[in-house]
Image (cartoon, grey):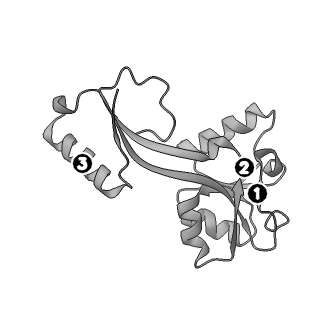
Amino acid sequence: MTPTPVRSERHFGCLKGLSTDRLVLVTPEGHPLSQRQKVIFTDVLDYQHVSMHEGSTLHAFLLDLSAQHGHTLTLRIQLRSFEGMCRMIETGVGIGILPESAALRHQQTMKLAVIEIDEEWTLRKRSVLVRDMEALPGCARVLVAELMASGSGGSDHAA
C-alpha cells in the first residue's frame, strides 16, 4: 500500500485504488487560525505542532514539506494515534495536520476546528500495488480483497 502518488506504474501489473482522503488543519476552538475558512501551509509554520510519531509517513512527509519551504516544523509532542493528537490539540498543546476523516470523527466529541488547507498535496489517494496478483500467495490475495472491501473501493487500473 502507498499513501503517496506512484511515480512509475510500469513495475506493477495492477494498481488498485483503495481510498482517498484529504489532509486538514486541526486547531483548538478559539485558536487564531480557527476562524479561517482556508489556510496554506506557510500559514501554519510559525505555530507549535502536535504530530504523529517519528517513523510515520505523515510525520516524515510534513517534515520534508516544511524543509522544502525553508522552515523547521516546531514539534511540541509526537503521538501514536489521531485520537491522541486531537486530545492534545483540544487542550491547546499545538495545532496539527490530520486526515479529514479522523479530524471530523474526533470533532464530534472534542472542541476542535477543522480548516481546509488550500494545497494540492492535501489530497491523498491510497493504492494497493501488486506486480502480479496471480503470483501472490492465497493469503496475500485474500488480504488485498479485504483491503479493497473495507476501503472506499475505487477502481482497478492495469498498468
Q: Residue 112: give x, y in percent of width and height.
A: 68, 72
Whether residue 84 appears in this view of the structure is yes
Q: Are marks 1 and 2 in contact (CB under 8 Å)?
A: yes
Query: Which label's residue is closer to the chain start, 1 or 2?
Result: 1
Residue 38 circle label: 1
- Inspect the image, locate mark 1, and give the three-letter code of the amino acid beneath it: Lys
Q: Residue at x 72, y 72 (%)?
A: 91
How packed mark 1 is, by other alpha carbons closer than 10 Å (few <14, some 14-19, many 20 or more), is: some
Quarter location, residue 8: top left
Across and down, in percent, residue 29 comes to 76, 73
Discs 2/3, front = 2
Counting residues from the start of the chain, the first of labels 2 and 3 encountered is: 2
Depth check: give the residue in front, 3 or 81. 3
Is residue 30 found left or right of 113 in the rendered image?
Answer: right
Q: Is residue 135 left or right of residue 91?
A: left
The number of discs equals: 3
53, 107: nearer the viewer: 107
**What amino acid type should be assigned to the residue bearing mark 2?**
Asp
Residue 104 in the figure: left or right of residue 112: left
Q: Are marks 2 and 3 in contact (CB under 8 Å)?
A: no
Which of the image's four quarters has the N terminus? top left
Q: Looking at this rendering, what residue extends furthest in the left direction?
A: 138
Residue 145 percent coordinates (x, y): 24, 48
Residue under label 3:
145
Above or below — where is 148 with respect to 70? below
The residue carrying pointer 3 sits among few (fewer than 14), some (14 to 19) or many (20 or more) residues within 10 Å by Cα, namely few
Q: Residue at x 81, y 45 (%)?
A: 42
Q: Residue at x 17, y 28 (%)?
A: 135
Q: On the rendered structure, is 14 left or right of 120?
A: left
Of residues 8 and 63, the one drawn nearer to the viewer in this rendering: 8
Mark 1 and mark 2: Cα distance apart in space: 6 Å
